[in-house]
Amino acid sequence: MSFKDHIDTNKLPQHIAIIMDGNGRWAKKQGKLRMFGHENGTQSVRQTVETAAQLGVKNLTLYAFSTENWNRPKIEVQTLMKLLISSLKKEIATLQNNNIRLNAIGNLEALPSKARKELTHVIDLTKNNSHMVLTLALSYGSRDELLSAIKTISVKVKNNIISPEKIDESVINEHLYTQNLPDVDLLIRTSGEQRISNFLLWQIAYAELYFTDVLWPDFSKEDLYQAIVNYQKRERRFGKTSEQLS
Ligand code: IPE
Ligand code: IPE
Ligand code: MG
């Protein structure tokens, strides 16, 4: 029996976001270097992307590298960047075969130019794909995103392009890296940590949170199905009462 049989495909989360955590611990458990975990984590990425697309999920956002991750040892940062470049090259076929458009959020200027170039290349190659949007959060931090939005909006106010009274939620949305993406419905974090780590603070305002102890390299199709089944059992009230919803 698969959790898949319990998924109602008419009630899929429109936007799933995942904090892919636990690569280092996964490797350490086997006496290997952290990098071994990151390498194996890419298998989970491919499988999760394909599974989400096949189910009909419209938006999948993966936290791949945070603004805080720049503070890791230089060698780990370098190898992660190399892994990003090689994965982007390798997964073009996966994206094309599944009609997936690649998107990226974060302070992309901070990425090494080779990585940025490859990213821009794959984004361009897949720009007309329409089945699912895969967003990679790279050099992403929610506070950094909000700061840059506030700065841009402030300049517009100063130059009379927008008046302060006109600033509403949609204006904020338009100035975030996530721009046209809908709010997150389901946020998954692997590895047992129960924290947000500066990920999509504005966009998860009403997301359902799902934490699993599974380490990212072990995250399987079934784990994704299980998270969605769990999500579908919840009542999303958005401040209303249960009675109002039925
Ligand atoms: C997630 O795994 C990958 C990145 C943050 C890049 P970690 O590298 O954080 O693995 P743990 O948390 O140390 O096990
Ligand atoms: C969060 O994982 C960032 C990514 C998954 C890319 P971390 O492993 O960096 O998070 P903290 O620092 O332990 O909260
Ligand atoms: Mg971690």
Image (tube, grey):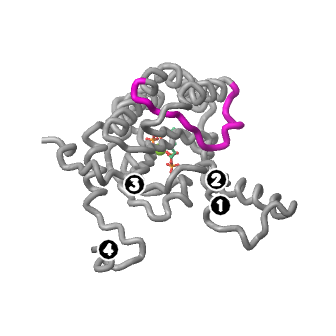
Q: Does the numbered disc 3 mark a residue whose Cβ is under 8 Å from ligand 2?
A: no
Q: Specify whether 158 is left or right of 188.
A: right
213 in relation to 130, above or below: below
In the rendered structure, which disc, 3 or 4, sits on the residue that comes first in sequence? 3
The residue at which mark 3 appears reads as: 186
Region rendered in magenta: 97-113
- In percent of width and height, residue 73 lies at 60, 35
Confirm whether residue 75 shows in the render: no
The residue at which mark 1 appears reads as: 172
Task: Give the numbered dot on residue 202.
Answer: none
Amino acid tagged 4: Leu
Q: Does the numbered disc 2 mark a residue whose Cβ is under 8 Å from ligand 2?
A: no
Q: For numbered disc 2, what is the local secondary structure?
A: loop
Q: CA distance from mark 3 to mark 4?
A: 19 Å
Of marks 2 and 4, the one in the foreground: 4
Task: Give the numbered dot on residue 245.
Answer: 4
- In percent of width and height, residue 84 lies at 54, 28
The residue at which mark 2 appears reads as: 176
Crowd band around label 3 with a 10 angstrom C-alpha radius: few (<14), some (14–19), many (20+):
many
Crowd band around label 2 with a 10 angstrom C-alpha radius: few (<14), some (14–19), many (20+):
many
Q: For numbered disc 4, what is the local secondary structure?
A: helix
Q: CA distance from mark 2 to mark 4?
A: 31 Å
